[in-house]
Amino acid sequence: MTEPTDLHYLSLARLSGLLETREVSSVELTKALIARIERLDDEYRAFITPTFELALDMARAADAEIAAGRKRGALHGIPVALKDAYDTKAIRTTICSRVLADRVPSEDAAAWEKLRDAGAVLLGKLECTEFCLGGPSDNGLVPHSRNPWNTDRYPGGSSSGAGVGLSAGLFPGALGSDTGGSVRIPAAFCGIVGIKPTYGLVSLRGLFPLSGSLDHAGPMARSSEDCALMLDIISGHDPRHPTSVVAAPPGATAALSDRLDGLRVGYVRGFAEEEGVGEEPRLATEVALQVFAELGAEVVDVELPSLWDFTVCNSVIMMSEAFAIHEEWLTSRAGDYSTLTKARISLGGFISATDYLEAQKMRRELAQATRRAMDEVDVLVYPGMIGDPPLAADVKPFYFLNTPLITAPANVSGVPAVSTRCGFSAAGMPMALQVTGRLFEDATVLRVSHAYERATPEFDRRAIA
Amino acid sequence: MSNPDAAEFERIALRVGLDPADHDMEGMRGAYIRLRELMTRLRSDDRAKTAEPLFTFDPVSNRD
């Protein structure tokens, strides 16, 4: 029998099995996690709005259905948490902003609707950077969450609470969102796993937009298998949102395998060697390439346009679209924005319509170049981050103008991209690699990252007990 | 103001409604100048002036 105190770092897949066999109940699991959150979250600050009473109600309902032989699937009875950018009916949803501090949606976001219908249990809403753009501000609505690997270091954003809570063992799965890397950066900095799915695969309805043409809703967990379980549930066409595509769920869980025989892996050496990308992430990625080869994949070098081209294209589109959303509030509610967020969003007002359209034209060219590169390979691999997470106190408003954003290429081209852990730096911080694939081949991407994780269990270290 | 970038910054800041009481104007000006440098990457002599800006993930319309 598994003791409730042992549950916090178990995988979602394993927990689902324990619920299935009724070795553990959803109420026991939920209570164990609530106790852990109450013990640790003052230090790590992953949650902005806990929903513990609701969670226990949902857990009791799940237990009753499972006991009656009506288990709905892998997520039934599993506690999860949501970035506070996802609308939750009758539950405050602020996007961690003072502007929307009292906002209570009347409907659930589409992705949460699907998890809820699958029987997931909502532990609460998670801290994120203000409006999914700001950084660790001293004058935001709530204090920023803290990286369990080193609380002085930035946990990455904007889905920071999700990365922190998963790393601290507060829940086994979460939903984040990703416009330039906001799922994958906290995944990398916190040593967990996150996937930005193909654009349009997961509905954006009810996810507060940062930049609609670049936004993606995606799962975060501690393994690719757990991300696959969640992605299979939250995917699918939503006729109520214009960016949702008519595509079947990816079947990611069924495609998982421990081997990669017959797959061609393209190493984007140019990204890894771009100025500003550190030697440690490059070397860690190159060591990972040897693992891919041992698993049966053929590894070849692949060329893409400059990482800076993707970075600038992403930043110009994101800042322009964000400014269009916030322009009126920036004047009427200026005092309600944190200094950092206000500066970043305001810079979007300096981008002309011509520059925005040139960025969208460039985006097509970059996406075409990405597609051509993938004619020859099944996936692309490159570092998940350019170095160790900076000290939270050192994050400047416009850092992104001076360092390449290695997560941006997948947002620009819309392809699926997973970030998974690949070792530890000399400073003891987690390192990460990215695997990206062809549009709508999310299952292949997760298959590759899963096989890699299975072959490298030595990197499954935890930040805290 | 002799620096054309600085003059342009002042003009746009006024239009955007940037209030010096709310912003580090020096920081914003520096960010704007850096952004201008970076945005030269967006232009391409190889791109037709009439190139379609609308981006879509429709596999047919995005074909080379």
Image (cartoon, helix red, strand yellow):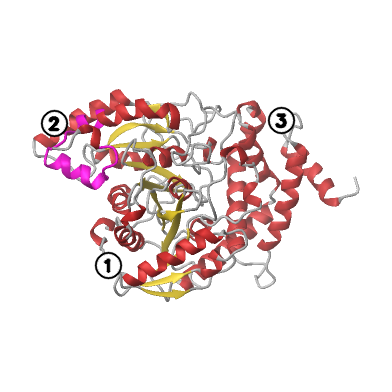
In the displayed image of the protein, which residue is found farthest to the left?
A68
Judge by depth and name the residue closer to the eye, A153 or A437.
A153
The amino acid on which the numbered mark 2 sits, given as a three-letter code, is Ala
Residue A64 disc label = 2
Question: What SS does tag 2 mark?
Answer: helix
Image coords of residue A41 (percent x, y): 40, 29
Q: Which residue is mark 3?
A: B22
Main SS category, magenta section: helix
Is residue A32 shown left or right of residue A288? left
Judge by depth and name the residue closer to the eye, A438 or A137.
A137
Q: Is residue A109 visible?
A: no
Residue A259 disc label = 1
The amino acid on which the numbered mark 1 sits, given as a three-letter code, is Arg
Image coords of residue A99 (percent x, y): 56, 28
Q: Is residue A442 above or below residue A176?
A: below
Packing grade of label 1 (10 A; few <14, some 14-19, many >=20) is some
